[in-house]
Amino acid sequence: MSLKCAFVFAGQGSQATGMGKDFFENSQVAREIFKQAEERTGIDFESLLFSENENLSLTEFTQPAILLVASIAHKLFIDKTSIKPILTLGHSLGEFSALVAVGALDIIDAVELVNLRGKLMSDACANQEVGMLVSLGLSDEAVEKVCQDARDNGKQVWAVNYNSDGQIVIAGIKKDLEELVDILKSAGAKRAMLLNMSVASHCPLLESASAPLEAKLREVLKDNFIAPIISNVTAKAYSTKAEALDLLPKQLVMPVLYKQSIKNIDNMVDCYIEFGHGKVLAGLNKSSSSKPTFNVFDMASLNATIDAIKELQA
C-alpha cells in the first residue's frame, strides 16, 4: 500500500533548551549540518540549543534554531526511508522548513534566510512595545469582531494565527492586547493570555520587513519542488519559485491559516509526520483531523515513526 503522507513543520513557540541534542550526539550528519550552519551565520548553535540562555527566546535566534533542528530531523528520516510527501506545510516559520523538505531551499541557505527574517521582524517592531495573545474557546467570528471593534477605537490588534477551532492568536501593540484580555473573557473566552513573544507576527506592523525578505528569497530559492507546499496565506498549494516569491513576503503581514490548511488537505492524506522539537502541530491537528500525526524529534521517535508507517503500509 502506498501511504499518502503530509510533512508538517512547527514555528516559533516550539523551541526548548536541549532540542536537537540527541541528533547531535548520535549522528555525524547532524553534527556536520550544525558546523555548516555556524560557519554561515556565526551563531554557536551548540551553546544556543544545549545551554540555558536568553537568546533562544529572541526571534533572530529562535527561527534558525527551530528550522535547523526540524530540517535535521527531516534529513535523517529521508536518509532511512523511501517515503516521500504528497504535500508539505508549516506553521509560520515552519513554511520555510517545508521549503527545505521539498528541495526549494538548501538547509544552510534556509538557516541564514530565517536568521535574517528574524532580524527583519525584530527591527520592524523595535520602536514599539508589541506582543501576541492567545484566545481559547471563542469562534473565529467572535475574535475577529473583538479585534475589529478595537481597531475602530484606534487600537492596533489583529487575529493572526488560526490554529484550531477555538484557538486563535492575536498580534499587535502590547498595551492594546492587554486591554483585550477582559473583553475576550467577557465575550466568552475560556482563556485569554499574553504569550512570551518579542515580535508581533503576521500583521501590518511587519510591513517594512517584506521587501528585504523578498530580495533574499529571490537570491536563494530554487525552482525545484518535489511536492507542493500549502501556503499559510491562502491555505492552497503552490509549487514554483514565482509563487513562493509572491506568497512568503505576504506571510509576514497576513494571518496563518493553519487549521484551514489541514481541513483543505485532510481528505487527500493518510497521515501527517511532524518534524522538529515537540508535538505542537500534532496537538493542533487533533481538532481538525482524525488522521494520525507521527513525530520525529530524536533518534527514538525517528525509528518509532518509521516502524509505525511500515505497519500502516502493511
Image (cartoon, rainbow, N blue to C red):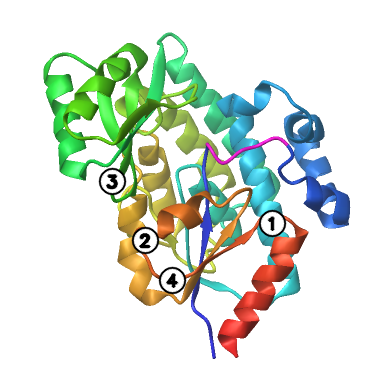
Asked if disc 3 and disc 1 are in contact, CB closer than 8 Å, the reply is no
Q: Secondary structure at mark 1?
A: helix
Task: Provide residue 184's location: percent of width, then percent of height.
Answer: 22, 28
Residue highlighted by disc 2: 262
Q: Secondary structure at mark 4?
A: loop
Instruction: Work out whether 275 lies above or below 148.
Output: below
Q: Which residue is the site of mark 1? A: 73
**Amino acid type, callout 4:** Lys
Using the numbered discs, state the Cα–Cα distance from disc 3 to disc 2 in whole angstroms.
15 Å
- Closest to the observer: 92 or 277? 277
Q: Are marks 3 and 2 in contact (CB under 8 Å)?
A: no
Residue to which mark 4 is pinned: 291
Kind of residue sitting beneath label 1: Ala
Query: Which amino acid does the dot numbered 3 rest on?
Result: Gly
Marks 4 and 3 sit apart, C-alpha to C-alpha, by 20 Å
Q: In the figure, residue 252 lies in which quadrant?
A: top left
Mark nearer the N terminus (4 vs 1)? 1
Q: Which residues lie in the magenta part?
A: 13-17
In which quarter of the view is residue 302 placed? bottom right
